[in-house]
Structure formats: C-alpha cells, structure tokens
Image: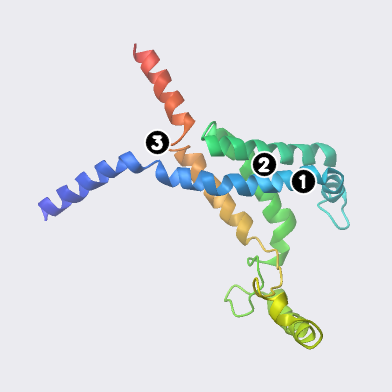
Amino acid sequence: MQAMFSCYHSAVVRSQSFSGIAPLLLRLYLAPVLAQAGWNKYLHFDNTVAWFGNADWGLGLPLPSLMAGLAIAAELGGAVLLALGLLTRLICIPLLITMLVAIFAVHCPNGWLAIADSSSWLANERVVNSAQQLNAAKSLLQQHGNYDWLTSNGNFVVLNNGIEFAATYFVMLLSLLFSGGGRYTSLDFWLWRQRAQGVAA
C-alpha cells in the first residue's frame, strides 16, 4: 500500500510539469469567443449603446456609451491578453464582471438552457412551451418549403438564450483567476520567472 501511494505521489509530482496545459486550453477556448463578442459590439456600436441604455427592451444601464466602450475593451483586450497568457489574473476581473452582468441582466429570466430542449430536466415552462412552436414551424416548412435543403446543415432549434454559456464562461474565467495563465504556457510565467531570476541574481 505504501509503495502504491509513493508511486501515485511521484506521478502527481511529475505531472506538474504539464499543469499549464489546462489553463492554456481554457485561454485558447475563451479568446475567440470574447473576440467575436467584442467585435460584434464594436461593429454595431450605436445599436449596442441603444441596447445598453434602453430600459424598455434593453439593459437600462446608466452611461450606456461608456458601458458599451468598457465592455468592448474588456472583451477585445481580454481576448488578446488571454491568448498570450499576459496579465491573466488581472484581465479575468473585468471579464468576470461582464459575465455577471450578462447572466443577471440578460440571460437569467430565460432559465439555464441556451438552446430550448423540452426533454431536459433543466427545462422551464418557457422551454416546454417552445416545443409546440418549434413543431408548428417545422410542419409549415415541411409543407411549404424545401425542408431537406433547409435542414441539410443542421436541425432547427429555438434559441432560449438562458445563462448556460455565460455561466460556463464565468466558471472558466474564475478558474483562470486562481490558476493564472499556466506554467510554461503563458507569458505571465516567463515574465515572473525572469523577474525571480533577476531578484536572485
């Protein structure tokens, strides 16, 4: 038993050389997602500002131009910094705030699911009711449209726009906040190592 534990402990110690892979994968997954979100807001800046500021059909945030600019800067700048593994912990903070705003101001009323799936145990009343609408839409398209062509690249779904994706990104960013950019796989690691060597010298 002692030999087994010793072998396991030795394997764990050796595996630390590869501990940077997980943060690297999280960073490389998040970077294009954030870049796309920020770029879309930038391309349609006036619409973004209107959505941020309008209380009737938008978020109703104060200073919508400033808030939109900050969101764009956080997402585009965050994408670049996460891809490089530079200032990883620092950039995670505004990105976590952005995700919290998205979760509670945009997605929360829709429940958990991003895509409506009435068979899911996470389905709320809104999702369950959407099944009837989806079936009606499919029936209309099968009768009056080229349904095989319309579905050749995938099935029709109802976008529920729940918190699923934003919550997932929040968890990934929270993990990076505590782990950092990753051993050997981030600029943070090499800059810290260079500084440490300079101090030691």
Asked if labels 1 and 2 touch by Cβ distance under 8 angstroms, the answer is yes
Q: Is residue 107 above or below residue 43?
A: below
Which residue in the structure is indicated by mark 1? 41
Which residue in the structure is indicated by mark 2? 75
- Across and down, in percent, residue 61 comes to 82, 46
- The amino acid sitting under disc 1 is Lys
Q: Residues within 10 Å of mark 1 (few under 14, many from 20)?
A: many
Earlier sequence position, callout 2 versus callout 1: 1
Quadrant of the frame with the N terminus: bottom left
Which residue in the structure is indicated by mark 3? 183
- The amino acid sitting under disc 3 is Arg
Decide if residue 37 is on the left or right side of residue 177. right
Q: Quadrant of residue 192?
A: top left
**Of helix, strand and loop, which one carries label 2?**
helix
| Residue at the image point whose x is 31% and y is 41% from the top | 16
Earlier sequence position, callout 1 versus callout 3: 1
Asked if labels 2 and 3 touch by Cβ distance under 8 angstroms, the answer is no
- Across and down, in percent, residue 101 comes to 70, 49
- Across and down, in percent, residue 26 comes to 50, 47
Earlier sequence position, callout 3 versus callout 2: 2
Q: CA distance from mark 3 to mark 2?
A: 24 Å
- Across and down, in percent, residue 84 comes to 53, 35
Q: CA distance from mark 1 to mark 3?
A: 33 Å
Q: Residues within 10 Å of mark 2 (few under 14, many from 20)?
A: many
Decide if residue 139 is on the left or right side of residue 167. right
